[in-house]
Image (cartoon, grey):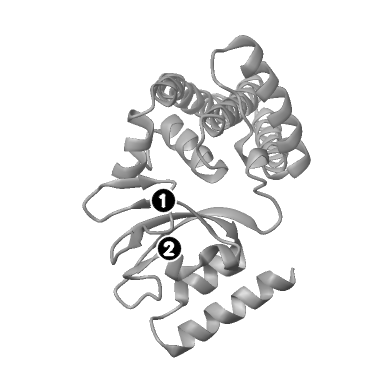
Amino acid sequence: MIPAISLFVIVSLSALITRIAAIALAHTGLSTEVARFQARSAYTGTGFTTSETEKIMNFPVRRKIIYSLMLIGNAGIVTTMSTLILTFVLPNSTSSLLWGLLIIVVGMAIIWWAVQSPWVDKYLSKVIGKALKKYTKIEVKDYASILHLAEDYRITELRVDDDSWLANKSLNQLALRKEGIIVLGIKHSDGEYLGSPNGSSLVKTGDLLTMYGKEDVFLNLNQRKRNLEGELEHQEQMRKEANN
């Protein structure tokens, strides 16, 4: 029974550690989804891609968080596996084995509920954020609140295809602000990045746009083609935005 309880404690601590790391990464400017993925990837040692690794390696604070998480993860996984083996291989009796299984099942159910619960997530984020601000040198900022990433507002990236309505037009011609979309940056296909572009900035085929606005407009924009129908959709979106 003791190994089963130990396993529950270890898994709980692992979940808490990855949550702390995810919040810390989010405070460095990563989106919540990317921060959680990076934290879990670092803890388990899997899941990295080249582009996402660059986002970590080019940022000293993120590197420190990920490096610490990797060290803790290596020890945590080994301990978890050892404890799991002890739970099933060395039970004192059948009843001990059953109790161990019950503790593991109930414990995992509680952890799963806690991980999925919006209330727990909100409370933990607040507590961990205050702790990070008080005891670390990480610049703690709630970027989601600053940018009002709530309801249907998002920051997203969109790749400009050959037949995209966006291709080979300036931002003035596109008039995306009239649709409620703000272009934060343009990464050209040659790797050059243009931050805070002005109206004369040209959007080319292969460019990656970073934009802020409503999710439904992003979906429409992503599917909009360079034809008459695309222009009509643009006019319709501008009318909707003007009436809001």
Mark linked to residue 67:
none
Q: Position of residue 200 (x, y in %)?
A: 38, 59
Q: Position of residue 110 (x, y in %)?
A: 73, 38
Q: Position of residue 154 (x, y in %)?
A: 59, 54
Q: Position of residue 187 (x, y in %)?
A: 33, 51
Total marks in image: 2
Q: With respect to residue 140, does 103 lie above or below?
A: below
Residue at 74 percent across and 36 percent down: it is 122
Residue at 39 percent across and 70 percent down: it is 166
Picture quadrant where residue 213 is located: bottom right
The quarter of the rendered structure image containing the N terminus is top right
In the image, farthest residue toward the left: 190
CB within 8 Å, label 1 to label 2: yes
Q: With respect to residue 49, does 211 lie above or below?
A: below
10 Å neighbourhood of mark 2: few (<14), some, or many (≥20)?
some
Q: Residue at label 2?
A: 171
Residue at 59 percent across and 68 percent down: it is 179
Mark linked to residue 197:
1
Amino acid on which the number 1 mark rests in the picture = Pro
Residue at 44 percent across and 46 percent down: it is 196
**Circle 1 SS class:** loop
Q: With respect to residue 156, does 84 lie above or below?
A: above
Horizontally, residue 208 falls left or right of residue 92, namely left
Amino acid on which the number 2 mark rests in the picture = Leu
Picture quadrant where residue 119 is located: top right
**Circle 2 SS class:** helix
User: How far apart are the two marked residues, 1 and 2, measured between alpha carbons?
Assistant: 8 Å
Residue 20 seen: yes
